[in-house]
Amino acid sequence: MPRTRQAKEEMLTNFAEKWSNAEVAVVAEYSGLTVEQMETLRKDLKKSNSEFLVVKNTLARRVLDEAGAEKLSGELKGQIGFALGYEGIGDAPKILLDFAKNNEKLVVACGFAEGEIADSARVEAWSKMPSRTDLLGMLVSSLQSPLGGLVSQLSAPISNFVGTLEALAQKRAEEG
């Protein structure tokens, strides 16, 4: 059943809005995946604030051209979908590539982030990057470690002084 012009415009607007909010996009060919497999992929992506969208290539080209991503328009061939990641560059590619390992019918074509097209090898490199949460955890621990050392260094003279006072008090108690 053909879509009406209004439905296409709504799809176009929806995709354009999601594209503009995404930090990373991975283009993947999904030909041959079952509905269940697509649902599983979408659920996995949703857990990391990402999503998989299927958009007609002609409509996607219009959005990409208007968004300044015309370089990517040439990569839109066949049945493709977009995995859009909204938090960090690594989560969506990681989930998509992990899914592709178990489902050979999903093939990662390329990626797009920070105005540049990335080949599948670079998308794989993105997937190995730590997530935003992991990076924040690393930052906190690296800030916490020197502060803990500083506290112990500052408290050492006080501990030594208290130990000396206790030893002196014990010695006087024995003498006196």
Image: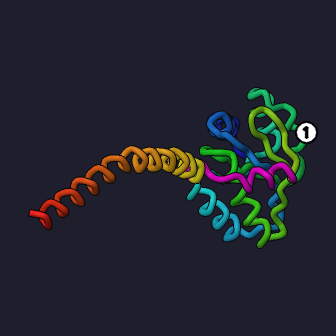
Residue 109 drawn at (x, y percent): 86, 52
Q: Residue furthest front?
A: 175
Instruction: Please state which of residues 91 and 143 is positioned toward the viewer in this rendering.
Output: 143
Q: Is residue 124 magenta?
A: yes
Q: Residue at x 84, y 49 (%)?
A: 122
Q: Nearer the viewer, residue 17 or 48?
A: 48
Using the image as rendered, state which of residue 25 and residue 136 is in the foreground: 136
Quarter holding the C terminus is: bottom left
Task: Determine the residue positioned at 71% across, 52% down.
Answer: 129
Residue found 88% across the figure and 52% down from its top: 78
Report helix, strand or loop for mark 1: loop
Q: Is residue 62 above or below residue 42?
A: above
Read off the magenta span.
121-133
Judge by depth and name the residue closer to the eye, 56 or 93.
93
Horizontal and vertical percent for residue 31?
A: 83, 62
Q: Is residue 160 in the magenta section?
A: no
Question: Residue under circle 1?
Answer: 74
* Dominant SS in magenta: helix
